[in-house]
Amino acid sequence: MVQLEELNLTNSYAAWEVYEGNKKNSADLTELELLLNLKSLSISIVNTRVVSRNMHFTKKLTDYDISIGEFPTNYHSSTSYIPCTSQCSLQKSMALSLPTKTKLGEWISALVKSTEDLRLYGDGSDNIVHELNSGRFQYLKKLAIQECHTVDHLAVTADASRPSSGIFPTLEMLHLREILNMKEICHGPLPAKSFGELQYLHLQAITGLRHLCSGPTPNLSLSNLKSIYIYECRNLVSLFSTCVAESLVQLEELDVGDCQMMNKVFFHEERQDNVTNSNLEFPKLNKLVLRCLHTVTSFCIKIDRISFPQLMVLKMEDLPRFKGFCPAKSSQISPVGRNTDLQILFNKKVASPRIKMVKLRMLDKMSKVFSHHGFFHELEFLEVDACQGLSSLFSSSVARDLVKLKELRIRNCRRLTGLIEKENKAQTNTYSTVTFCSSKTPGIIFHQLEYLEVDACDCLEALFSPLVAQGLVKLKELQIRNCKGLVEVIEKEDEQVQMNNDPTPFPQLKYLELLNLPNLRSFWHTNYDIKIPSLRDVSIDANSPSVVQLAKIAKHARQRNAWKTRKLFLKELASSEETATLVEEENQRKVVSQIFD
């Protein structure tokens, strides 16, 4: 045993003690001093008294994973989910959960200063955090601190006793959680090279945090930062300055939420070289999430153009005051008679040519999602929910770009009068709202659209023009619910539009749902018989005025496909008895006979 070089006791024993004298009731940690060749040690120790004792077995350790104290369930997994980005895995790791005012023995101080991965839990960590401020942790790559409420900052750069080198120059990951009294990460101006290797920044429930740094930040470069996750920092007013934002050339993911006092994501700061840069680019950002930011009005200010060349996923939820990434002056974009405080989310100042998924919910200051074409050829999924200022989704020029759109969901947009807004070329500031796809907006055909859901949009009167309905060759599922103003699904044919005498809209449509549409008069006001050859499932209100026409559509599909629809359709009729006033029983029989006779 004395020749042992590697010892792993992490999951086998934790009741270590340090005894004085001969009386011993359990394993004595000093016995490890007999292992003169010990170089690698993994051990868990519950008794925190060992911290204050003097140990000598640690001097020859080249790698270690030492845990001292009691931790909450799943604590270690919650602080290690972000991978280390070093070329080799971390070889020196410590986790400490200590009582308050714990005196550290020399062996612990030495190990802490040489550690690469340091996890601290509880108020007893404040003396170690104070050591962090000394700048002597030259090897630290991963730092996680949780529930240490006595800490108000990690570093004070105005302290003359600390080294002049940057703050945490080797740190790759910073995880801070539930530190209630922390006011800022760094007090004072940041020296050059501070956080120069930082790749992951995770802050959660730092309720006192108002600024990440109290001093000016033009020297701060976060050129290696890949992921920012900041949640429940209710007093934080912004993340970084635009000067710092220019250095975020490796940033891939930005996720911010539940910061009640934040008014903008990036604030404006003058550069030291007095060079004015009106453009901002995040060259590698592929995912952007903003949630529950009730006072945020913009992403940044005093920027003429912002570019996300690699952005693929955008999720924004509960931003009632958000006006845009680079809000335009309201007089430049607002139609006549519209609330001049409303804005366009993606105006001509914003470029995101590779975006594939957009989810928007509760953006009340948004009048339209897209206005400028040329940047949305890759969009596949669009969901818009509870945006009460929204009158349309996009302009007709943008709609022509959506050649890959597969899934479209619109819910609870009570003021939405049309999904496409047609620009008036004669008067650039005037707009007219049309249906989802009007025959007056040629070239708007969503060949790849497979799923369309429209729910609780009371101002919509129709969705499709006949020509565009026939162009939706891949549409498989159509759900329309709770639209009180909807009169017809496919609008009446334009007299100038020549239709063939065998109209077949939605050739691949398998599921059709039309529920709680009290003013729906027809599926399509046409003189032709409508054929939807692939239809398999129909859900409608039995008392709908359009039910007879829909029955004919279902009958044709049944005859073509030997469709067993009787059970499905009758089930809908039966379930309607519990929730709606039905037509007379005789009319029900007529409906059913339209399908099965």
Image (tube, rainbow, N blue to C red):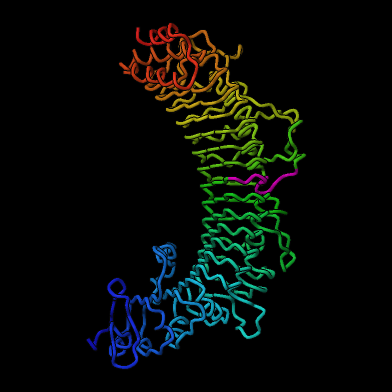
Apparent side of residue 99 relative to residue 217 in the rendered image (left or right): left
Main secondary structure along the magenta-highlighted residues: loop
Q: Is residue 309 visible?
A: no
Q: Nearer the viewer, residue 188 or 124?
A: 124
Apparent side of residue 230 relative to residue 267 in the rendered image (left or right): left
Q: Nearer the viewer, residue 232 or 440?
A: 232
- Residue depicted at 53% across the width and 58% down the height: 229
Seen as rendered, the residue at the extreme bottom is 21
- Residue depicted at 45% across the width and 17% down the height: 504
Q: Is residue 262 above or below residue 64?
A: above
The image position of residue 112, as x and y in percent, is: 46, 80
Apparent side of residue 438 relative to residue 381 in the rendered image (left or right): right
The image position of residue 117, as x and y in percent, is: 44, 73
Q: Is residue 241 above or below residue 36?
A: above
- Residue depicted at 64% across the width and 42% down the height: 345
Apparent side of residue 69 relative to residue 331 in the rendered image (left or right): left
- The quarter of the picture where residue 417 lies is top right
Q: Within the magenta stretch, is there residue 538?
A: no
Query: If the image is split into quadrants, where does the N terminus sit?
Result: bottom left
Q: Within the magenta stretch, is there residue 325?
A: yes
Q: Is residue 417 above or below residue 6?
A: above
- The quarter of the picture where residue 433 lies is top right
The image position of residue 152, as x and y in percent, is: 61, 72
What is the magenta range?
318-329
